[in-house]
Image (spheres, rainbow, N blue to C red):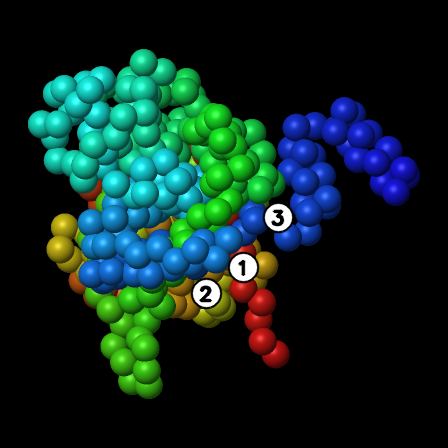
Amino acid sequence: MHRLVIILLVLIFAGPPAALVGVAAFVNPAARACASGSLIIGDIPDSLTATTRSGHTIALNKSQLGHAATITTVGSQTVGVDRDGVIIAIMAALTESGLRMLANPSAHPESAGYPNDGNGSDHDSLGLFQMRPASGWGSVAELMNPDYQARAFYGGTTGPNAGSPRGLLDVFGWRELDRGAAAQAVEVSAFPDRYREYEPVAESILTELTRSGGRAGNGAGAAPPRVPETTRVVFPLPDGTYTGTDSFGWRVDPVTGERRFHAGSDLAAPAGTAILAVADGRVVFAGERGTYGGLIVLEHTVAGLTVASFYAHMHDEGIHVAVGDTVAAGQHIGDVGSAGKSTGPHLHLEIHPGGQNEPAVNAVDWLTEHGAAGVADSELTIAGCRPERTP
């Protein structure tokens, strides 16, 4: 045991910052860096009964579950938040407000004028997470907005408070913390142990909310549910990692020398660079396909239209999703490779408005037209482990 401690101390103080993640995973093999499962909301039930860690039964109504759905949707839109992060957020809201948007007329009379589920009276705290204007979380108008409160709780580079007060993504190593400790790191409560009580309730809520929004079909021959409208569109490689090498249209094939039509946009990037889903969607293909090499095909709904996106030339070990998975825009779905008909590491991206069997359009132009946002490399996380393949 002493020898293990010495090795860990050497790694922490002598190694680069990236080594800290490896140390945490070594100490805790069950570290939750690869939580899996859909974050796409299905039908919100009228009620749900769940049991706390200590065995108490609580009943939640549709309004409370609707707030949990908002927290989940915002989490799916936030790069770096996965299913585990959403559970932590729901735990915090259950503990702080019982998943209710609480006004506080005694401290902020104007808060009663916003949609709410009742009144609270803890200092000047407001809303789902009982955030305080006096502590810098936001204005009364902002904190009476459930969407804003969820974004503030998650924090990170896209959060509204720039890390002060800090949200979950601003807590170093939050994935290696106990979920209750992670919630406490954001809420800074005088009662730090109470969040763990609601962990099984949060898990039950998220399972129920995503039950019909995840994998396709509930029975033999069942048609997959329509992919919900995407919440945003992003560029498929992190900012600063790529250069355009070949464009959409007619060209001289670099392998055969023949003049052929090129249906995608080629973006050169170092092998292993994260490939990101361009929009919220569902995986309809993941595996080897001819000259594409390793290929992922996603289906999305963008402006009411079905759109398919193709991501090609990954090596087998570089595919991190499986057919039926749901993904969020900006989620790390694979790694750049050079498999198939390829002359070097790059992403071959195709966009097919109307679906995967319809003609492709210029992918870069399509992304530009739809206001695709860039994603910083530092914001990335793999939101799901690559599934084991059966023989």
Tell me the CA gap for discs 3 and 2.
Answer: 21 Å
Checking the image for residue 316, the label placed there is none
Q: Amino acid at mark 1?
A: Arg
For this rendering, which residue is in front, 342 or 16? 16
Tell me the CA gap for discs 2 and 1.
Answer: 8 Å
Task: Residue 368: tell me if it is visible.
Answer: no
For this rendering, which residue is in front, 160 or 90? 90
- What percent of the width, then of the height, locates residue 152? 34, 29
Q: Residue at x 86, y 33 (%)?
A: 6
Q: Amino acid at mark 2?
A: Ala
- What percent of the width, then of the height, locates residue 88? 45, 43
- What percent of the width, then of the height, locates residue 118? 19, 36
Q: Residues within 10 Å of mark 3 (few under 14, many from 20)?
A: some
Q: Residue at x 35, y 55 (%)?
A: 58
Tell me the CA gap for discs 1 and 3.
Answer: 15 Å
Point out the image quarter for the N terminus: top right
Which one is in front in this view, the residue at disc 3 or the one at disc 2? Answer: 3
Figure quadrant of residue 339: bottom right
Checking the image for residue 31, the label placed there is 3
Q: Earlier in the sequence, mark 3 or mark 2?
A: 3
Point out the image quarter for the C terminus: bottom right
Q: Earlier in the sequence, mark 2 or mark 1?
A: 2
Secondary structure at numbered mark 3: loop
Label 1 near label 2: C-beta < 8 Å? Answer: yes
Q: Amino acid at mark 3?
A: Ala
**Residue topped by disc 1:** 386
For this rendering, which residue is in front, 21 or 357? 21
Secondary structure at numbered mark 2: loop
Checking the image for residue 322, the label placed there is 2
